[in-house]
Every structure is written in C-alpha cells, then in structure tokens.
Amino acid sequence: NSLETLELARMHAYECDKDLEQLTKDEEAYEDATTRDPEYFQPSPDGQKDEGDVLGQGSPGLIFDSVLTNPEEGLKFNQKKKAAQKE
C-alpha cells in the first residue's frame, strides 16, 4: 500500500510540474485520441518522425483522400454514422 501511495505521489508531482504549454499539448493529444476515427490517419508516436512526412507537412496526397475524390469513403462514413445512431 505504501508503494502505491509513493507511486501516486510521484505521478502527482510529475503532473503538477508541467507548464501551460505541456498541459495544452496533453489536452490536445487526449482530445485527438478520443475523437479521431481509428480508420483515419494516425499520428506517429512522440519522438518518431513519420516516414512519409515531407517538410513537416505530413504525407503527400492525404489532403486529396476525401469524400469528394473517393465517394465510396463517404458512403462508408454515412453507413457508420447511421449504425451509430441506431445503437
């Protein structure tokens, strides 16, 4: 029990030591992780550079992978949306 309390105290101290920039970054990462569709492009883990990254702008061509250029993706999205509404 004392080891659990010690670990909890260390985690608390680590969280309390964060500055505003780190808190904002953590909040954005949490929101992204909870709202991003798992089939959508996933960001690379911290400290790792994406192999397809070009000049820090991401992978070329991802912006064109939309429901306008790929209507079947729009159909899949609408089907998932309807299924989620039924649940």
Image (cartoon, rainbow, N blue to C red):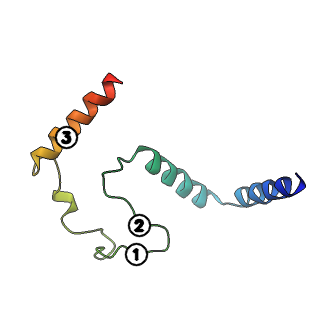
Neighbour tally class for label 2: few under 14, some 14-19, many 20 plus, Cα within 10 Å = few
Tell me the CA gap for discs 1 and 3: 30 Å
Tell me the CA gap for discs 3 and 2: 25 Å
Quadrant hosting residue 49: bottom left
Tell me the CA gap for discs 2 and 1: 7 Å
Pinpoint residue 24: horizontal percent, then vertical percent. Answer: 55, 54
Q: Nearer the viewer, mark 3 or mark 2?
A: 3
Q: Which residue is mark 3?
A: 76
Q: Nearer the viewer, residue 34 or 21?
A: 34
Q: Earlier in the sequence, mark 3 or mark 2?
A: 2
Quadrant hosting residue 53: bottom left
Position of 31 compared to 72: left or right?
Answer: right
Task: Please name the residue shown 88% across and 51% down the image.
Answer: 1
Position of 64 compared to 38: left or right?
Answer: left
Label 3's element? helix
Pinpoint residue 55: horizontal percent, then vertical percent. Answer: 30, 77
Quadrant hosting residue 44: bottom left
Q: Nearer the viewer, residue 71 or 16?
A: 71
- Image quarter hosting the C terminus: top left
Q: Earlier in the sequence, mark 2 or mark 1?
A: 2
As displayed, is residue 33 above or below residue 58?
above
Q: Nearer the viewer, mark 1 or mark 3?
A: 3
Neighbour tally class for label 1: few under 14, some 14-19, many 20 plus, Cα within 10 Å = few
**Type of amino acid at the residue the image marks with label 3:** Lys
Give me the disc on residue 44. Answer: 2
**Type of amino acid at the residue the image marks with label 2:** Ser
Give me the disc on residue 49. Answer: 1
Marks 2 and 1 in Cβ contact (< 8 Å): yes
**Type of amino acid at the residue the image marks with label 1:** Lys
Position of 52 compared to 68: left or right?
Answer: right
Task: Please name the residue shown 32% across and 76% down the image.
Answer: 51
